[in-house]
Image (cartoon, coloured by chain):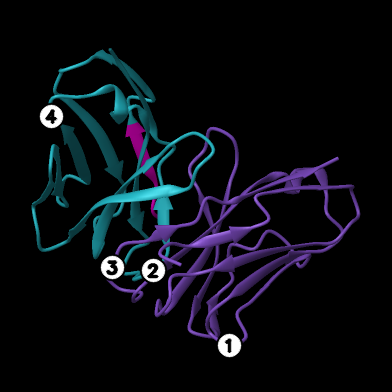
Chain colours: A purple, B cyan
Amino acid sequence: GAGVSQSPRYKVAKRGQDVALRCDPISGHVSLFWYQQALGQGPEFLTYFQNEAQLDKSGLPSDRFFAERPEGSVSTLKIQRTQQEDSAVYLCASSLTGVGSPLHFGNGTRLTVT
Amino acid sequence: KQEVTQIPAALSVPEGENLVLNCSFTDSAIYNLQWFRQDPGKGLTSLLLIQSSQREQTSGRLNASLDKSSGRSTLYIAASQPGDSATYLCAAPIPSGTYKYIFGTGTRLKVLA
């Protein structure tokens, strides 16, 4: 497609459940990012991929969060044993390169943990 | 550590006004700075990217300037329209970083018809 696609658009999980969020970046984009956005706040960096290599995962809040991009295209953010504080919008972005090119964001997945 | 601040947090103006949104960052060792627009329930749309070697960028009614020495960037919107109503965010990369962007909390703009 022409833009970054994320699914599902909304996800409700009971505390303790595992969830998987998918991101389909723009074709040919080398860099892929995951951000977490709380209500009324700016996005906060979670992790960065260059092709299939995860070069930075310093923003992942805990070891319950795991991201992968095995073939350098689609990426999945997995959250194990979800907690209420995980409730947020999870945004995926891609860019043609990591340096000096604009970030293109998907519409996000709104995760609500009950 | 890079910190990004945006002022004002919210702004309401009548249609047709020219307006300025401000973004401050604490560390000037940046490669570029980006401005985004976010509509309710949507992702971010890239508006302008200013490289550190540039002082400003223009796209239609939007003009963004960058002053690294003072740690400031401004987004100027000319002849505002109701369709400009959205949250505007700026993002600066970490010092000497090429990919990790730190976002401000945004300015919520409402343009009244």
Name the disc covering residue B78, or none. 4
Which quadrant is home to the N terminus of chain B?
Answer: bottom left
Marks 3 and 2 sit apart, C-alpha to C-alpha, by 9 Å
Marks 4 and 3 sit apart, C-alpha to C-alpha, by 25 Å
Of labels 3 and 2, the one closer to you: 3
* Residue drawn at 29 percent across, 22 percent down: B82
Disc 3: host chain:
A
Q: Quadrant of residue B49?
A: bottom left
Residues marked 1 and 2, same chain: no
Cβ–Cβ under 8 Å for marks 3 and 2: no
Classify A44 as above or below A103.
Answer: above
Magenta segment, which residues?
B1-6
Q: Position of residue B79 (x, y in %)?
A: 13, 24
Name the disc covering residue B99, or none. 2
Q: What amino acid is labelled 4 in the image? A: Ala
Residues marked 4 and 1, same chain: no
Does dot 3 land on a helix, a strand or a loop? loop
Q: For mark 1, what is the residue?
A: A71
Disc 1: host chain:
A
Q: What amino acid is labelled 1 in the image? A: Glu
Name the disc covering residue B81, or none. none
Question: Is residue A16 part of the magenta span, yes or no?
Answer: no
Q: What amino acid is labelled 3 in the image? A: Ser
Q: What amino acid is labelled 2 in the image? A: Tyr
Residue most extreme to the front: A1
Q: For mark 3, what is the residue?
A: A101
* Side (left or right) of A86 relative to B15: right
Q: Is residue B29 visible?
A: no
